[in-house]
Amino acid sequence: MAETSYWEGSDKYLCDRELAQAFHMARTLGMPLLIEGEPGTGKTELPIHYSNDRKLDLHVYPVGSKSNVDQFVARFDHVKYLRDSQIEILNAQRAEKDLETKLSTGGRNPESLADYVVKGPATQAFQSPNSVLLIDEIDKAPREFPNDLLYALSHRKFIMPESGETIEVSEEEMPAIVITSNREQELPTAFKGRCIYHYIHFPDQEVMRQIVEKHHPTINEKVVDVALDVFYHLRRVGLDRAPTTREILNWLKYIKPLAPKEAIQKIEKLEGIGALIKTQTDLERIQQGVLRNPQDFMRRSTPN
């Protein structure tokens, strides 16, 4: 039976009520949870922290531009099969010559096709009761990839290549599947129809403060106040790539060991700004418009 208890986050992950409800619904119904939202909103972190918190096996498939179902489900290793078949022939020839030593196939048998099926993360998850499967950034995949997943998501089964073995799981034992998307391209409507959907909005300053507290519980409050003022100002000025949650957490991790007064001085001078700014154009804009007069920037970044 799959783990379907209501999960509201952990000491390292803040899960709001709407997201917790969507995640619980997906696991209860044996359906994937599709999470969309801009980068840095915690989409990928949800299944990671959930599996750690519940001590469940986690299987990850990072999607790319060349992703296909064979990589995700399973593929047949033709090279290894042909090599082992040749080894079997050579061993038979050696036996005819009364040679005792044999070449090894590593315990594989060419007559057993299942020995040459390389299982992907989807099959591993389906065969692991009470596990978690993360399909990360599916919007990067070719258009046919999500369409090819429709059968597996609808019928909860995969057919292994060459061997024809069926890997099937019941609705009650379906692994917790989380699919993330940054919306680089629109996903097929039929695919979305097989999922529970949730959109994560970027956290406001008060929610971000709670996230920071979970990751850096001992950091000085004034340091957090000043850093968040700068962070949200940078998100408002129209940069090509606005800084994300992960980046403010990294910046604070760099600043945290310092005494509060020194830390605030470094923030005001925008030291370590490379933790937040990720493009040359944005860095030049910040340097030209801000670093010439950091105090003026701080006044502008602080809400009235």
Image: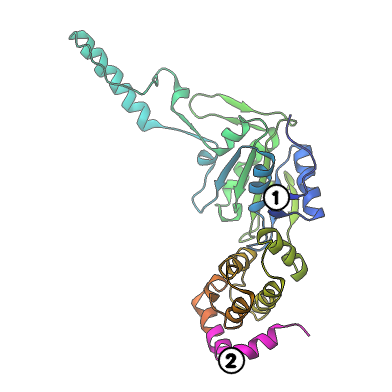
According to the image, label 2 marks what residue?
Answer: 293
Name the kind of residue labelled 2 in the image: Asn
Q: How many marks?
A: 2
Point out which mark residue 57 bears. none
Q: Residue at x 17, y 9 (%)?
A: 97
Residue 300: image quadrant is: bottom right
Q: Is residue 166 above or below residue 154?
A: above
Q: Is residue 56 above or below residue 304?
A: above
Residue 103: x %, y % from top left: 27, 20
> What is the magenta range?
286-304
Spatial distance from mark 2 to mark 1, Cα to Cα? 44 Å
Residue 79: image quadrant is: top left
User: Is 84 positioned to the left or the right of 34 in the image?
Assistant: left
Name the kind of residue labelled 1 in the image: Leu
The magenta stretch spans residue 299: yes
Location of the C terminus (image quadrant):
bottom right
The magenta stretch spans residue 26: no
Q: Is residue 271 above or below residue 20?
A: below
Decide whether the magenta segment is chiefly helix, strand or loop: helix
Mark 1 closeness class: few <14, some 14–19, many ≥20 residues within 10 Å? many
According to the image, label 1 marks what residue?
Answer: 34
